[in-house]
Amino acid sequence: MKRIFWLLIPALLMLSACRSSKKGVGNETDPTQPTTTVHAEKSTDSPSKKKDKQDPDLGKMKIPVGTNFTSKVRVTITQNGKDITTNGNLRMRYDDVIQITLFDPLLGIAEVGRMELSPDNVLIIDKVNRRYTSTTYDEFSALKSRNIDFKTIQDFFWKEAQNGDKFAYTIPAKSDIKLDLKLSNKGNASNWSAHTQVSDKYTKTDANKLFSNMINE
């Protein structure tokens, strides 16, 4: 059960990397990119309701810096025929930070890990084993090799979170990872700490070694 956090993080980063290669395709699936599948279910409008042609295109509207988005998230990861589910929080502050926290699948209240992405830094904290990794996008070889930066990841998370509540992804790996996400209680709360200070009781871990080991198992 401790493994879910360290499997989810590279899966999410790889997912945003794969999806970024489809820029310019619009909402359709690019047939030349078969390794990542995405299905989103929207639950806000009935199928019969047509969009007003005068409605603004939210994807093209400028989002003010500091705009908040918060949501509860339920995560299920499946690999090698085994799956595990846990709950967590997704918090974003536009052009500032993307923060994902996950809770213990059994207790449901104890935080087991946190990923915090800012424009210049990737911070991942394992609260169970008291270790963390903190690196830049250029130093994180798995992201640099795919030209992935904060803006790329933010564009992916922001659009996905705003456009639907249920998602199913397959992330290509040595043993493919199926990732199911369900969002609920969406809001724009601002009363949360955006930047975590890591305790000196935690041991720093090399990001590239950790990422490579988890994604290629």
Image: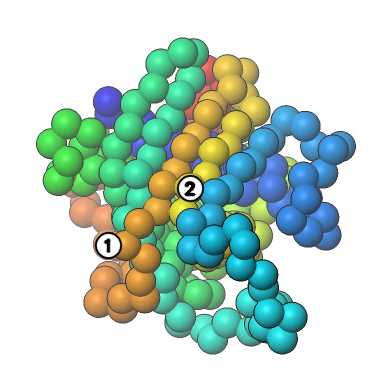
Coloration mode? rainbow
Q: At 62% across and 48% down in the image, what residue appears?
A: 16
Of the residues shown, which amino acid type is indicated by label 2?
Lys
Q: Quadrant of residue 70?
A: bottom left
Q: CA distance from mark 2 to mark 1?
A: 32 Å
Residue most extreme to the right = 32
Identify the residue under disc 2: 166
Q: Is residue 80 left or right of residue 28?
A: left
The answer to whether residue 94 shows anywhere in this view is yes
Residues marked 2 and 1 touching at CB (< 8 Å)? no
Decide which of 21, 146 is in the foreground and name it.
21
- Callout 2 environment at 10 Å: few (<14), some (14 to 19), or many (20+)? some
Q: Earlier in the sequence, mark 2 or mark 1?
A: 2
Q: At 72% across and 30% down in the image, what residue appears?
A: 35
Q: Looking at the figure, which quarter contains the N terminus?
A: top left
Find residue 130 and report its horizontal and vertical position in percent.
23, 39
Q: At 45% across and 24% down in the image, what residue appears?
A: 78
Label count reads 2
Q: Secondary structure at mark 2?
A: strand
Residue 197 numbered tag? 1
Q: Is residue 26 left or right of residue 55?
A: right
Find residue 26 and report its horizontal and vertical position in percent.
78, 59
